[in-house]
Image (tube, helix red, strand yellow):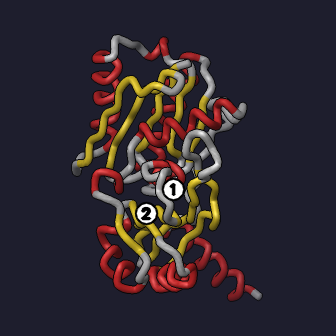
């Protein structure tokens, strides 16, 4: 069973091919270039180097959010296009869970942080399930959108070691590390999105029968866009004006 996983949720564009539990290939581009320009060529080169074609893929996976709205749409459209053309199932994976999987053997509480702009971050908390033969994750705080001060208080109140990772550290890492005495940052090579980690999370979902069709796969923005929020405020003001 071969799984192609795509992640364009942040500035990092990454894809990987997993054959059951064996990583065949992975591509990571962490550079300022449009995902729409770099993702398809990266996938094409990766498959060619692996001696594979799209027809050899059994399941198409995609990281479905939260993250960059534009990036998420590109990844979803790419995966859906492949799945629909080849009549294959899909699997979706949370950006935060995929990030946490980078350090799934950590004894600390794992806190993936993604910059949500507007002074906020997307966050969830995970713990490694030490009882499993292979490290797995259990969620201890549901995905949410927080301002950094609120997140700092929540992490400090845990009073236990916390591993921070994700692109949110670039902007807020210093503030969080100063505010949370038990916090530490994951090494840079583990702190960014990797499609291989998302693929292993996706594999477990596939084994649990949690695949979807290309028509069912959906994005998890976790909050409305700025334009949507402004539109709702405008409609609310207009409604109040007419009362």
Decide if residue 4 is on the left or right side of residue 204.
Answer: left
Residue 125 in sight: yes
| Mark 2: secondary structure | strand
Q: Which label was assigned to residue 96?
A: 1
Marks 2 and 1, how far apart at CA: 8 Å
Residue in the foreground of this view, choosing between 139 and 91: 139
**Residue pictured at 44% horizontal, 16% vertical:** 54
- Whichever of callouts 2 and 1 sits on the residue coming sooner in the sequence is 1
Near mark 1 (Cα within 10 A), the count class, few <14, some 14-19 or many ≥20, is many
Of all residues shown, which one is farthest toward the right? 243
On-image quarter of the N terminus: top right
Residue 212 makes an appearance in the image = no
The residue pinned by badge 2 equals 114
Position of the C terminus by quadrant:
bottom right
Residue 48 sits above or below residue 241 on the image:
above
In the depicted structure, whether residue 103 falls above or below residue 123: above
Front position in the image: 48 or 162: 162
- Occupied quadrant, residue 142: bottom right
Local crowd at mark 2 within 10 Å, few (<14), some, or many (≥20)?
A: many
User: What x and y, as percent, mark residue 109?
Assistant: 52, 66
44, above or below 154, in the image? above
Taking the spot 68% from the left edge, 37% from the top edge, the residue there is: 216
Q: Nearer the viewer, residue 101 or 7?
A: 101
Residue name at image x 43 percent, y 49 percent: 102
Question: Marks 2 and 1: CB-CB under 8 Å?
Answer: yes
């Amino acid at each position: 069973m071969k799984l192609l996983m795509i992640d364009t949720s942040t500035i990092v564009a990454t894809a990987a091919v997993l054959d059951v539990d064996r990583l065949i290939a992975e591509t990571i581009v962490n550079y300022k270039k449009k995902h729409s320009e770099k993702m398809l060529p990266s996938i094409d080169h990766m498959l060619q180097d692996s001696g594979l074609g799209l027809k050899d893929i059994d399941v198409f996976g995609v990281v479905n959010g939260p993250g960059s709205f534009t990036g998420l749409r590109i990844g979803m459209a790419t995966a859906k296009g492949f799945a629909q053309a080849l009549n294959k199932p899909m699997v979706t994976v949370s950006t935060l869970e995929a990030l946490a999987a980078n350090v799934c053997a950590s004894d600390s509480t794992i806190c993936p942080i993604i910059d949500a702009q507007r002074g906020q971050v997307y966050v969830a908390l995970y713990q490694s399930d030490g009882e499993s033969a292979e490290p797995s994750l259990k969620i201890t705080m549901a995905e949410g959108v927080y301002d950094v001060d609120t997140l700092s208080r929540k992490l400090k109140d845990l009073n236990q070691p916390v591993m921070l990772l994700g692109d949110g550290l670039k902007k807020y890492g210093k503030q969080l590390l100063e505010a949370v005495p038990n916090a530490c940052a994951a090494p840079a090579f583990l702190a960014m999105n990797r499609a291989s980690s998302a693929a292993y999370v996706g594999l477990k979902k596939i084994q649990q029968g949690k695949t979807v069709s290309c028509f069912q796969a959906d994005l998890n923005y976790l909050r409305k866009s700025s334009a949507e929020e402004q539109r709702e405020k405008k409609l609310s003001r207009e409604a109040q004006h007419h009362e």
